[in-house]
Image (tube, coloured by chain):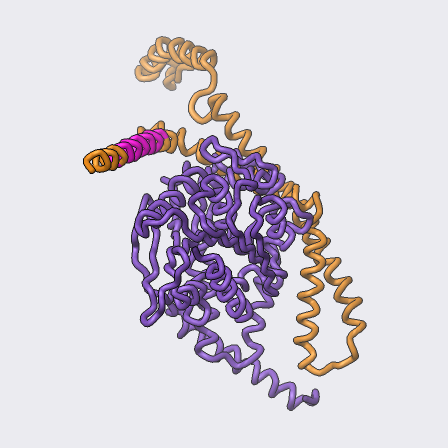
Amino acid sequence: MESESPAGNPEPGATACGAGWDSFGPLLRALCSDAARAGPLGIARPESLRAWQHTADLILQWCQLQGQMLLHWSTVARNAAEKFNLSARELPPDPAPTNMRRLYDLWIDCAEQAYAMEVHTDEYCRTQAGLINVMAALSVEQRGHLERLARSYGMPTQTELDALRAQLRQMQAELRTGSQRRRKGSHRGKRAGR
Amino acid sequence: MSDSPGDIGALYLELSRRVIDAGIKLGKASAATVGCSLKEEVWRQDKTVLYRYLPLPFTQPSRAQPVLICFALVNRPHILDLQTDRSLVQRLLAAGLDVYLIDWGRPDASDRDLELHDYIERYLGSCVEHILQANNIDALNLIGVCQGGTLSLCYCALHPEQVANLVTMVTPVDFHTPDNLLSKWARHLDMDLIRRAGNVSGDALIGLFLSLSPFRLMHQKYVRLFDQAMDTRTAESFVRMEKWIFDSPDQPAAATAQFVQWFYQQNGLIRGTVQIGGRRVNLGRIRCPVLNIYSRQDHIVPPSAATALRRYIGSPDYTEQEVDTGHIGLYVSRRAQEVVPSRIVTWLRERAT
């Protein structure tokens, strides 16, 4: 849309702009439609999106497992309190402060018993293992994100370092085998010399 | 003590005094060093070092073959030589034995691909070879401690001709006994995934061991410090133990994954499914005399996990020694110090060739 002077004539600059847009507009539209056909770029690329989606899924799993773990811990606390309540009643009534130590030890015993009861259950073992597995998976995912970032900056990645290390280990193993063969050979030589 | 307000006040004053006193003594003891016996490095490959302890002066050398101690990967081995009155190494030296110890070092990211084969055949095997050559003998005495005992059993089964006598201390053999909490926790772990995540952090391991008995190990132990007035020696012993407990090296990813999968998950040692370098580990091939020492109150390696050994080895000369302590107590407790070293020395002397 062109701006007009108070007299109703278009401004010279506005005319130039309009002419510029007339030639630039179709080019920009073409570029946009090409870009749209090419799909999302950068961080929005499908593979990046999938990786971030997976990370988000793992974080969600981790939160769910943490919730389950809290339930287990609340069971431990409840059972420990019940055990302590029952056991403390059996103690002779003695309000002396020195009795506090005995009560403390009793509380520890009850807590350990309640804990042992809970942590041996299959549900607890699965929850704890699940948490560790998810944390390991998150660590692997994070490493993947960092690898992509490092690659885009031309920096060495963990995969490249691992490949180099594997080559080094192979060379060391070959060196060891060679030196062992040499040692055996020299032993045989000495024996033959005798 | 009566419970009048004056007595209560005095009690709290006493408690406060003990807390402050313990704090000061622990602070002073924080410089306490671990390890009391003189040793020399005799062999090294990568991060693994073989040490030979120097004989004690005026000690008659024993007729028994040299002793190689193989400790666990998950902790530092200096617990066996913590201080003069708590040192298995020192007692063995005092009996005239020639003592060697493997220090696995502190693995870092460059060691993540090390496998059990590397630890058993390459490192432990090279240490054994070195000692055999240095002493011009065919077989030595091997003492395996905890996880190191499991590695020693594997080695002994693969190379029975190189081990004259085998001593296992708090060594898990049957990993699926009902009271083995670590094994239950490990059962559902995805070790391939954990392996891909890299080395297992030492701090995570410390947390795992403490969480086997969290209220006693993370709370009661510290409260008990204030039970009685603490002397400098007690403070130093406490500090040394704490330093050891909180000093687990990171674990190489591949070896840890294999150990958990083969032993904890598949119970492969007694099922005969473990393969090291393509060779099956068959406990039945262990025909040398075996002394199996275990703790009655062990929360890490329950007695049932350790005593299973007698059913699977092929040795006709098998001895068990139970000690009424916990897992760590077997290394350092006064009761264990009275029983364990002398039992090992007598047992080895009886079998010295």
Report the magenta residues as a range. Answer: A163-183
Q: Which chain is orange?
A: A
A170 in magenta? yes
The C terminus of chain A: image quadrant: top left
Residue B37 rendering spot, x and y as whole percentages: 36, 65
In the image, residue B140 sits, relative to residue A194, either above or below, namely: below
Q: Nearer the viewer, residue B1 or A151?
A: B1
Say which colour chain B has.
purple
Q: Position of residue A40 (x, y in %)?
A: 47, 19
Residue located 49% across and 64% down the image:
B346
> Looking at the image, can residue A45 be seen?
yes
Q: Position of residue A106 (x, y in %)?
A: 70, 69
Q: Residue at x 35, y 69 (%)?
A: B59
| Image-based side of A61 in relation to B146, left or right | right
Asked if residue B207 shows in the view, the reply is: no
Task: Please state, as top left, top right, bottom left or bottom right, where the N terminus of chain A lies in the image.
Answer: top left
Decide which of A79, B274 is in the foreground and name it.
B274
